[in-house]
Image: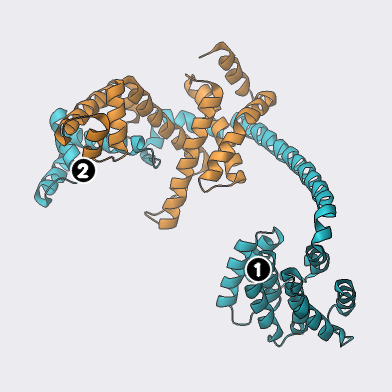
């Protein structure tokens, strides 16, 4: 065995010349004992390296031992056991959820209490949260249409407040799509806004205003939201005034209200 | 195996939900942590946890398997390996290394058990050799250069390390080959 081992080590360490390698490989093909030893040494390296799993040769499924395992997995008993295990896991899943909701509810209460103190000094954040109304944005996912998969994914990420990831997917969508759904500018803009990336948010609302669609008129309002969150009072006043100057403006009433509140 | 573990295993094998729940409480959070740290999510962890339990029962029923550690330690180890196995499968499918054959569930579970047995045999034998050898081989298998090993363990030269590695590896190989289980898994 030890004679083999030296050669095998050299082979596995890639320490052989091309010629030596060829001779060795020919030897492996004609000598089953050497082949077995080589496989064992290869396996040892993989197992002990602890990096990746080694998958076995499926031929072994034909032997007796494998067959008794296979028939167990096919049995009614195994099916019953599988169901029992699954049921316990599912029960715990819903239990965890309710814990989760209790947790969320508790943290919201705490947040509200904190906000009573904090937001007094920083009214704009409170106003922003009050007026941004994320839930009111029409959904990008429409029924019965051939929906773009990216859009769906992006909106879901957005709804789960994973703004960074949502931006990534929206950007991909905007880059790859010919006729871009202008709502995507609103979503992307707000995602940036949530992350306090004001310039990038602004750019999205610029694109929206130039989009030549029904939604284009909404751009002013969202730009106002940028100025509001950014604490840019002068710009905010100006844009609110331009919204208020036309009664048919998007969010006319809200703009009026907000204008009064900041002055 | 401890009496208590024996009873637990026996009860688990009947599908006793209380025992399953007990194991869920004691092990699942660790499994989730491990899976999430390694490119998986909670659903993956649930899947792996279920498979590991069924695998354990199958080994107990078909092969009269006994556990040398605690049930929790075994279970966590089995979950880790099943997840690594899953990652390997995913990688193979993405890189299309070879034509992907999808096995039916029972066949795949069977393969997982046989692969796990092989892994256990290798790990067990590594524990049997001397501490010196074990330390040396662990460095070697983690692809530490001979020079570095020499420095770390205080050997005079690369060549001494090379010789020591060779001897230790011969011992380890012998231990593996002399175990009756080796003949059953050598074609795997």
Chain of the residue under label 2? A
* Horizontal relation, residue A34 to residue A213: left or right: left
Chain appearing in cyan on the rendered image: A
Q: Which residue is mark 2?
A: A13
Q: Is residue A203 left or right of residue B162?
A: right
Q: Residue furthest front?
A: A121
A218 above or below B69? below
Whether residue A196 is visible here, answered yes or no, is yes
**Depicted B185 relative to depicted A102: above or below:** above
Q: Which residue is mark 1?
A: A192
Which percent across, then down, holds residue B94? 44, 56
Q: Position of residue A170 (x, y in %)?
A: 61, 70
Q: Look at 63% across and 19% down and name the residue there.
A: B11
> Sequence order check: which comes first, mark 2 or mark 1?
2
Quadrant (top left, top right, bottom left, bottom right) of the C terminus of chain A: bottom right
Question: In the rendered picture, chain B carries what hue?
Answer: orange
Tell me the crowding category of disc 2: few under 14, some 14 to 19, or many 20 or more residues within 10 angstroms, Cα based.
few
Quadrant containing the N terminus of chain A is top left
Residue at 16% x, 34% y is: B157
x, y percentage for residue B121?
37, 26
Which residue is rendered at x = 39% and y = 42% of the image?
A52
């Amino acid at each position: 065995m030890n004679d083999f081992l030296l050669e095998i080590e050299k082979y596995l360490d890639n320490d052989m010349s091309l010629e030596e390698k060829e001779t060795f490989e020919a030897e492996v093909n004609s000598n089953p004992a050497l082949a077995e030893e080589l496989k064992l040494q290869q396996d040892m390296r993989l197992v002990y390296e602890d990096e990746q799993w080694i998958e076995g040769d499926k031929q072994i499924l034909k032997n007796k031992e494998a067959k008794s395992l296979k028939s167990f997995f096919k049995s009614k008993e195994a099916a019953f056991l599988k169901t029992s295990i699954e049921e316990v896991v599912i029960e715990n899943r819903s239990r965890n959820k309710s814990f989760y909701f209790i947790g969320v509810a508790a943290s919201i209460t705490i947040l509200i209490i904190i906000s009573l103190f904090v937001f007094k000094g920083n009214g704009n954040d409170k106003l922003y949260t009050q007026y941004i109304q994320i839930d009111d944005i029409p959904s990008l996912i429409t029924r019965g249409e051939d929906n773009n998969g990216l859009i769906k994914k992006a909106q879901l990420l957005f709804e789960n407040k994973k703004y960074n990831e949502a931006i990534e997917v929206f950007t991909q969508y905007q880059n790859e799509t010919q006729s871009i759904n202008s709502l995507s500018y609103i979503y992307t803009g707000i995602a940036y806004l949530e992350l306090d990336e004001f310039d990038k948010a602004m750019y999205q609302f610029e694109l929206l205003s130039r989009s030549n669609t029904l939604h284009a008129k909404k751009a002013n309002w969202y730009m106002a939201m940028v100025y509001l969150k950014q604490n840019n009072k002068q710009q905010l006043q100006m844009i609110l005034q331009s919204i208020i100057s036309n009664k048919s403006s998007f969010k006319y009433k809200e703009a009026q209200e907000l204008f009064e509140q900041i002055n | 195996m401890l009496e208590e573990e024996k009873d637990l295993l026996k009860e688990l094998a009947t599908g006793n939900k209380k025992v399953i729940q007990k194991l869920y409480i004691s092990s699942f959070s660790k499994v989730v942590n491990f899976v999430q740290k390694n490119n998986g999510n909670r659903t993956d962890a649930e899947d792996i946890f279920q498979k590991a339990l069924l695998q354990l029962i199958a080994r107990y029923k078909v092969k009269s398997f006994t556990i040398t550690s605690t049930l929790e330690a075994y279970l966590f180890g089995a979950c880790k390996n099943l997840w690594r196995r899953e990652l390997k499968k995913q990688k193979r499918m993405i890189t299309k290394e070879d034509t992907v054959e999808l096995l039916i569930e029972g066949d795949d579970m069977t393969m997982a058990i046989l692969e796990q047995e092989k892994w256990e045999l290798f790990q067990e034998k590594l524990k049997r050799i001397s501490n010196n050898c074990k330390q040396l081989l662990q460095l070697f298998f983690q692809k530490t250069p001979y020079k570095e090993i020499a420095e770390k363990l205080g050997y005079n030269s690369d060549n001494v390390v090379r010789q020591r590695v060779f001897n230790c590896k011969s011992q380890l190989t012998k231990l593996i080959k002399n175990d009756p289980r080796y003949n059953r898994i050598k074609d795997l």
